[in-house]
Image: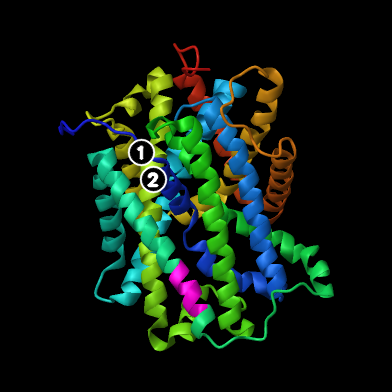
Amino acid sequence: MTTNRPASKISCATATAIVVANMIGTGVFTSLGFQIAGIPSGFAIVFLWVIGGLIALCGALAYGELAAALPRSGGEYHFLSGIFHPAVGFLAGWISATVGFAAPIALSAMAFATYLHGIFPAVPPLWAALALVWIVTLVHLRDARTGSAFQNVFTLLKVVLSLAFIAAGFAFARRQPVTFFPALSDAGLICSAPFAVSLVFVMYAYSGWNAATYITAEVRDPSKSVPRSLLAGTLVVMALYVGLNAVFLYSTPIDQMRNQVEIGLIAGRHIFGAVGGNIVGGIICLGLVSSVSSMVWVGPRVAMTMGEDLPALRWLAVKSRTERPVAAIGWQFAIVNVLILTATFEKVLLYIQFTLIFCSFLTVLGLIVLRIRRPDLPRPCRAWGYPVTPLVFLGFSVFMMYFTIRERPVESLAGIATLLAGLVVYAVSARGTSGPVGR
């Protein structure tokens, strides 16, 4: 990159857009059919998504304090390196810098291509997926201003169109015999195994609430802006998730959604008629553009931060004149292309879930450890409700890890093996260094 345009930092609004875009993908449009199979209650379903949002908020509050107290890009890699040991941080960074972001980007790009092909059958899905990744990557290689504008516009479109869909559903759809008020039978449903299993997948849909912590150094006034963006972004997504699931239940017969994947398309046809599928498909396409954009933005910052700390990975820290981490972006870009061309990312996604939950668990636990070890550390922002909110998050994280191991034992063990492999890579990469900067 040779442009002479000066580097600039992004606003709290853009950081919030990145959080929102990271969270909202295809999950909210596809998971309801499996939830209502075991939880046939409007109130229990809405409560499920509210609980998921509250857990995400507890995590966002904890990460907000850590980002303000330890202001540097890198997310879990930076936090865990400083609180526990550089090797622990490296394990989190190892996952993020290899497949933690690349696999979701590839999956989102392929989903975008599938929906676009459904609207315009002449468009080849493979080329559409590759084109999206190439275009978005080139945008983020340019400079912060261009990337920020691109991110804000597509995230705003995602939110506005989702709100329009919710409003249209309640205004024009024929109401189904569903109630959102609690009944005596709901207590049993909320305490049931199907509710517990559904919560695990709901939390997958909420993943991304920590996105702004990966780009802390690029945010103006990060000690205030990053915590605010995490909180605001999570609240926005929580409201959208609850509203979308409520309108699905309000507008569409439960029998037609049970065990179905394309819930958004089914509900769209009930609300808008024959063209409903294309309308919802278009909304999802625009949403996926912003999701890919946000992950292309934040993912390379982990690899870049690792490159700044470890001599063997120094090449990942190379930046352009406009402070774009060009080497790290290129590294992630190459992995994404391989995953799209080989379609191996679905298997990758199955086994990284356990490790991602585990890294978040350690990070929130680190908040408590840091409070004990370094009580005098300046904390411009403190987690509201401490210690209750981090303990709530930790409790549900243990719950989700248990169910992940029980339901996906092979993939979970593969994730643990990947972490162990990361230790070997760390041992080689850490030679000649004393640990991360700012520990």
**Residue 308 horizontal side relative to residue 90, left or right:** left
Examine the rendering and report whether any part of residue 281 can be seen: yes
Give x and y (percent) for residue 140.
Answer: 28, 43
Q: How many marks?
A: 2
Report the residue at 83% width, 68% height from top: 188
* Snapshot quadrant of residue 196: bottom right
The answer to whether mark 1 and mark 2 are in CB contact below 8 A is yes
Report the residue at 40% width, 34% height from top: 219
Report the residue at 62% width, 32% height from top: 382
Question: Pointer 2: what residue?
Answer: 14
- Asked if residue 181 is positioned above or below residue 236 in the image, the reply reads below
* Snapshot quadrant of residue 242: bottom right
Residue 421 image label: none
What amino acid is labelled 1 in the image? Ile
Name the foreground residue: 350 vs 322.
Answer: 322
Give x and y (percent) for residue 383.
Answer: 64, 36
Give x and y (percent) for residue 259.
Answer: 61, 76
Residue 10 image label: 1
Magenta stretch, main secondary structure class: helix
What amino acid is labelled 2 in the image? Thr
- Asked if residue 75 is positioned above or below residue 310 in the image, the reply reads below
Q: Which residues are magenta?
A: 163-169
**Residue 399 horizontal side relative to residue 207, left or right:** right
Report the residue at 50% width, 72% height from top: 166
Give x and y (percent) for residue 212.
Answer: 47, 40
- Asked if residue 219 is positioned above or below residue 281 in the image, the reply reads above
Disc 1 crowd, CA 10 A, few/some/many (<14, 14-19, 20+): many
Report helix, strand or loop for mark 1. loop
